[in-house]
Amino acid sequence: MDRDIENEMVQREMIAEWLASLTDAQREAVRWVVAFAVHMEAMMDRDIENEMVQRETIAEWLASLTDAQRDAVRLVWIEGYTQEEAAEMLGVTREAIRNRLMWARKHANGCQNGLAIPVYSRGLL
């Protein structure tokens, strides 16, 4: 522990000496870069927190779907199959896949944290 404190003190002294050797303009540039780095770190922390909330929301939404809806979502929205391909794989009609995806999307609106469901797919939805 003492060694860590000693190393930190040495690093601070080196930084102080380096800063003293800079011109005012260089010191201002360093301040700007440090402020920008701190800002970016805070943004990344927020992004990570938002992503965790979004993952929890998606997991909640997926758990709330019926098995049939979950299969349709997995095949069409996650794996990228067309509705026709998914229907053939599951042994149902394309209309059944379309309805399952429609209900899955409507069900997403009821999720606690809100969820943006993709509208893209190679099928109709």
Image (spheres, rainbow, N blue to C red):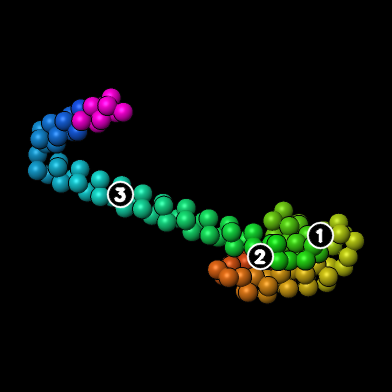
Tell me if 43 is positioned left or right of 110 in this view.
left
Mark 3 → mark 1, Cα distance in angstroms: 47 Å
Q: Residues within 10 Å of mark 1 (few under 14, many from 20)?
A: many
Q: Main secondary structure of the magenta part?
A: helix
Q: Of marks 3 and 1, which one's residue comes earlier in the chain? A: 3
Q: Nearer the viewer, residue 122 or 52?
A: 52
> Can I make out residue 80 in this image?
no
Element class at badge 1: helix
Amino acid at pointer 1:
Ala
- Per the image, the residue denoted by label 1 is 86
| Numbered range of the magenta stretch | 1-9
In this figure, what is the number of numbered marks? 3
Q: Residue at x 83, y 68 (%)?
A: 94
Q: Are marks 3 and 1 in contact (CB under 8 Å)?
A: no
Amino acid at pointer 2:
Trp
The verdict on residue 6 being magenta is yes
Amino acid at pointer 3:
Val
Picture layout, residue 90 above or below residue 2: below
Q: Residue at x 58, y 57 (%)?
A: 55
Q: Nearer the viewer, residue 106 or 7?
A: 7
Q: Of marks 2 and 1, which one's residue comes earlier in the chain? A: 2
Viewport quadrant of the C terminus: bottom right
Tell me if 45 is positioned left or right of 57 in this view.
left
Disc marking residue 57 = none
Residue 17: quarter of image: top left
Disc marking residue 61 = 2
Mark 3 → mark 2, Cα distance in angstroms: 35 Å
Element class at badge 2: helix
